């Protein structure tokens, strides 16, 4: 087997690695989703629960889809970086370099030189959020429609915010709650807690509302088609003609455009909150004092 054949074989295996997790998620949905008539708007289907000390841990459709998507993205990254060289000579490597350059530029412009190492994290947030919303195009439950998933992301960002706020020490962090005046302590505490809450509800609310609107309009068009065109003879009267086309257009907006937009907004808020939380001047002064003391 020559090198070219081996290269293509590995490509095929990586593509299978991308497709199989999503196919498995679709198979699980088909097998475990109960049949329902009419409009059905509900949360993620719970497959089973794991007993825990405080309360049971439900394993839901959104969690399974998230893990399947993470595996697919992992194999997609391996596929895109397979065969990379020092000098780009393939389309996929040019695409990879373009993605890296744009992500580095986005992070550099919004976070500054100190946070240049944040590019992989921001890229991961963008990819996971965007592709999670796009799962609805495959008939899968979008993880971004589950408030628990988004809350987990927001809590992770909140931990990063707190970490960088404490770069100058715990006392400096606690003192920041009394700025600009001590009377602002309660408001500053509420503002601190509100950060992950607002990030969660902004992302979840926009994605979930779009899904519900699409379902309601599709159901309304089906009923209107029966009302206006139900007099047609035979099978023609049962075909929802008014439902053809418009739901697909709405899906392009709510599932594609809106999902991409919310992913970008979540990433921008992450960069803004983390970079603004870092007390750069105080940290530089603290490091200068340490160097002077050590000298």
Image: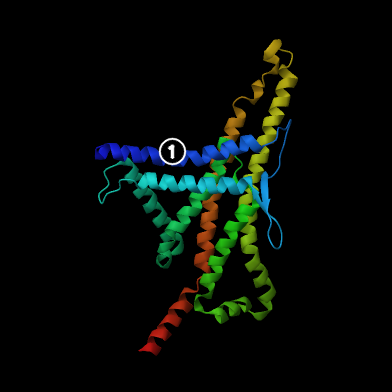
Closer-to-camera residue (40/191): 40
> What residue lies at 62% left-to-right and 57% top-to-bottom?
151
> What residue lies at 42% left-to-right and 81% top-to-bottom?
287
> Would residue 100 be found to the left or right of residue 85 on screen?
right
Residue labelled with disc 1: 16
Give the secondary structure at mark 1.
helix
Residue 294 in the image: above or below residue 14:
below
Residue 243 in the image: above or below residue 129:
above
Q: Quadrant of the C terminus?
A: bottom left
Q: What is the count of numbered marks?
A: 1
Q: Quadrant of the N terminus?
A: top left
Q: Answer with the quarter of the image where residue 188 lies.
A: bottom right
> Would residue 120 be found to the left or right of residue 63 on screen?
left
Residue 17 in the image: above or below residue 231:
below
Residue 144 appears in the picture as rendered: no
Q: Answer with the quarter of the image where residue 135 lies.
A: top right
> What residue lies at 67% left-to-right and 31% top-to-bottom?
218
> What residue lies at 37% left-to-right and 45% top-to-bottom?
80
Tell me where residue 47 appears, x and y as whole percent: 66, 45
Tell me where residue 29 appears, x and y as whole percent: 62, 38
Quick one: label 1, few (<14), some, or many (20+) residues within 10 Å?
Answer: some
Residue 245 in the image: above or below residue 236:
below
> Would residue 109 be found to the left or right of residue 148 on screen?
left
């Amino acid at each position: 087997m020559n090198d070219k054949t081996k290269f293509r074989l590995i490509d095929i295996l990586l593509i299978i690695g991308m497709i199989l997790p999503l196919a498995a998620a679709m198979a699980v949905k088909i097998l475990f989703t109960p049949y329902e008539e009419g409009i059905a708007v509900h949360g993620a289907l719970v497959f089973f629960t794991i007993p825990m000390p405080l309360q049971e841990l439900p394993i839901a459709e959104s969690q399974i889809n998230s893990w399947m998507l993470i595996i697919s993205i992992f194999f997609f990254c391996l596929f895109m970086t397979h065969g990379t060289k020092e000098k780009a000579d393939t389309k996929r490597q040019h695409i990879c370099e373009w993605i890296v350059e744009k992500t580095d530029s986005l992070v550099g412009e919004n976070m500054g030189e100190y946070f240049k190492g944040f590019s992989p994290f921001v890229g991961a947030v963008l990819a996971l959020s965007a592709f999670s919303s796009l799962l609805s195009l495959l008939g899968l439950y979008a993880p971004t429609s589950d408030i628990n998933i988004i809350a987990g992301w927001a809590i992770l960002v909140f931990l990063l915010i707190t970490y960088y706020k404490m770069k100058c020490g715990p006392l400096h962090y606690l003192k920041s709650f009394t700025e600009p005046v001590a009377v602002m302590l309660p408001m500053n505490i509420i503002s601190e807690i509100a950060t992950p809450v607002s990030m969660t509800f902004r992302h979840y609310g926009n994605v979930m509302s779009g899904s519900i609107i699409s379902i309601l309009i599709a159901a309304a068009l089906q009923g209107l088609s029966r009302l206006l065109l139900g007099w047609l003879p035979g099978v023609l009267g049962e075909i929802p003609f008014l439902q053809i086309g418009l739901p697909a257009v709405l899906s392009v907006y709510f599932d594609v455009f809106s999902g991409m937009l919310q992913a970008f907004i979540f990433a921008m808020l992450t960069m803004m909150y983390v970079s603004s939380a870092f007390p750069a001047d105080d940290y530089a002064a603290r490091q200068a004092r340490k160097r002077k003391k050590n000298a």
